[in-house]
Amino acid sequence: MAHRTARHPLALNCQSVAAYLAADGEIDPWPLLQELWSLGKDIYLPVLTPFDKYKLWFAAFEPGDQLAFNRFGIPEPVRRRLIKPCALDLVLTPLVAFDEAGHRIGMGGGFYDRSFAFLNRRQHWHKPRLLGLAYELQKLDAIKANSWDIPLHAIATEAAIYTAAR
């Protein structure tokens, strides 16, 4: 999956990539991150910030960087060169379930939907692109979207890359 996803146009045509470190059974993006680093991509991890309690910002991350656990027990970079979500080109998004239309069910906190809500208001500039990472068994026939849900542009699994119709 990592090699195929790193060579997909969504990954090739970007420079700044937000990722995550796997937790609670999420698919592990580490092999993909290694491929992206080898292609010269800049990787960022989500961080909770005191000035925006319900949204994510992103911190630069390289192999070997020191991590500390946030209030949810999720590791974040200690070194904090933060960027806003709108500065990213591609976001590798964890999920619990997805459908081919790009709808996703997350872990329930709403952080990704709130952080990328601006995408629903944009008319011309559509970055960052959101690429869900999942196991094929997480695919559902259909997910009923809520008004606040931010759809994915594509989903990569071990079997395929699904491009969502928009």
Image: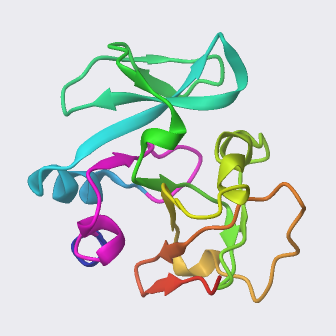
Left or right, 63 with reference to 78: left
**Colouring of the image:** rainbow
Percent coordinates x, y for residue 142 in the rendering? 80, 84
- What's drawn in magenta, residue-wise? 6-27
Left or right, 118 with reference to 126: right
What predominant SS class does the magenta segment belong to?
loop
Which corner quadrant of the image does residue 122 belong to?
bottom right
Q: Is residue 134 magenta?
A: no
Residue under the image location 65 percent in, 82 percent down: 166
Percent coordinates x, y for residue 69 in the rendering? 50, 18
Percent coordinates x, y for residue 153 in the rendering? 55, 72
Percent coordinates x, y for residue 39 in the rendering? 12, 57
Which corner quadrant of the image does residue 136 belong to?
bottom right
Q: Determine whether 76 is above or below 105 in the image.
A: above
**In this view of the protein, which residue sits in the foreground, 54 or 70?**
54
Q: Determine whether 27 is above or below 135 in the image.
A: above
Residue under the image location 32 percent in, 29 percent down: 60
